[in-house]
Amino acid sequence: MNRIRVIVVDDEPLARSGLIKLCSTDPELELVGECSAGRAAVAAIEQVEPDLVLLDIQMPEMDGFEVLHAVGADSMPHVIFVTAYDQFAVRAFEVHALDYLLKPFDDERFFDAIGRAKQAIREADPGSLKARIVELLTEAGLEDAEQAERKGRTGASGKRQDDFLSRIAVREPGRTVLVSVDEIDWIEAANYCAKLHTPSRIHVIRESLKALETQLDPVRFFRVSRSAIVNLDRIQEIQPFARGSQMLVLKDGTRVTMSRNRREALEQMLGQAL
C-alpha cells in the first residue's frame, strides 16, 4: 500500500516540529514538505501534489484560508486544519465537516484526525471534499469567480441576489471580524490588498479589487477606476474633474476620482447623462 504523502504548514517552529515528529511515528505517512508561510505552502502543494496537508490557519501575510483560495478547491488535497481557538474557523469547520486540530491538542486527538484522513483519502471522493472547501471559502468571503461559475452561476448579470457577498471576513490577530457589505462606503486598492472603508474604521484584506468586483452586487457597487469601487448609495455629488474624469463626493465628504472611461457605464447605471 502506498504511503500517504504529507506537507506540514505552520509558521511557529515548535508547532511545526511537533507535527512533523507525530507524523514520523506513523509508518503510513511520508513527509514530503514543510512550510513556514502561506505563499511557500501554495508553491509546495502545486509542485509536490501531496495527499494530505496539515494547514495552520493563523499565519501572517497569507493565512490558511488564503492558501486554500490560492490553490483552489479543484487542486487542494485532503486537509486537516490546525488552529488556535477561533470561533469563526471552528464553527465553519464543523458545519462543513472538515477536520481540524485545536491547539493545544494531544497525541490521541492528532491520530484520530489522521485516521479519518486516511479513510477519506483511500475512499477517494474528491468531489465531496471540493464542495465542502468551496462552501468554506464562500462563507469566509474568499470564493473566486471561476469557482462560482463552476457551481452553476452565470456572472454578474445572471446572478441571484443571494449569490453576492453579504459580508466579508477580515482576519485579524486572534480573531476574524465579519464586515457587512452594507457598512462599506468604498473599497480602495492597496498593492496586493484592499481597504474596506466603513464609517467606523478601515479594514484591510488580502484580496484584489478584480476578485471583489465579481463577488459584490453590481447594482450597488461600481468599479470607478483601477483602484476604487464605490457603494453607489454613498454618492452625494458628481463633479467634473481633470481631463474628462469625474470626482465623486461621498456622503461623509470623501472624494474619489472616477476614470473618464467609466463615465458612460455609470451613466447607464444611473439612467441619465452626467
Image: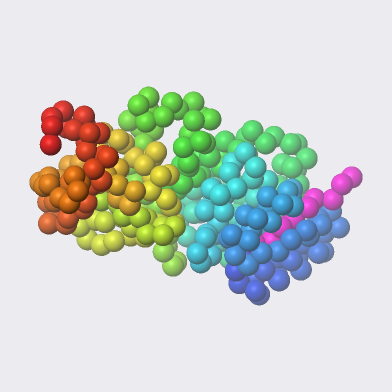
Residue 84 appears in the figure? no
Q: Quadrant of the N terminus?
A: top right
Q: Residue at x 48, y 50 (%)?
A: 91
- Residue 6 lies, in percent from the top left, at 75, 55
| Span colored in magenta | 1-9
Residue 44, located in which quarter of the rendered image?
bottom right
72 within the magenta span = no
Q: Residue at x 64, y 70 (%)?
A: 15
Left or right: residue 264 versus residue 172 is: left
Left or right: residue 51 versus residue 236 is: right
5 within the magenta span = yes
Reply above or below: 255 against 151: below
Q: Residue at x 48, y 34 (%)?
A: 148
Residue 127, located in which quarter of the rendered image?
top right
Secondary structure character of the magenta stretch overall: strand
**Residue closer to the observer: 192 or 142:** 192
**Residue closer to the observer: 33 or 111:** 33
Reply above or below: 30 against 142: below
Q: Quadrant of the C terminus?
A: top left
Q: Residue at x 22, y 33 (%)?
A: 264
Question: Coloured how?
Answer: rainbow
- Residue 115 lies, in percent from the top left, at 74, 50
Most extreme residue toward the right is 1
Residue 81, located in which quarter of the rendered image?
bottom right
Left or right: residue 251 versus residue 99 is: left
Residue 271 appears in the figure? yes
- Residue 96 lies, in percent from the top left, at 54, 42
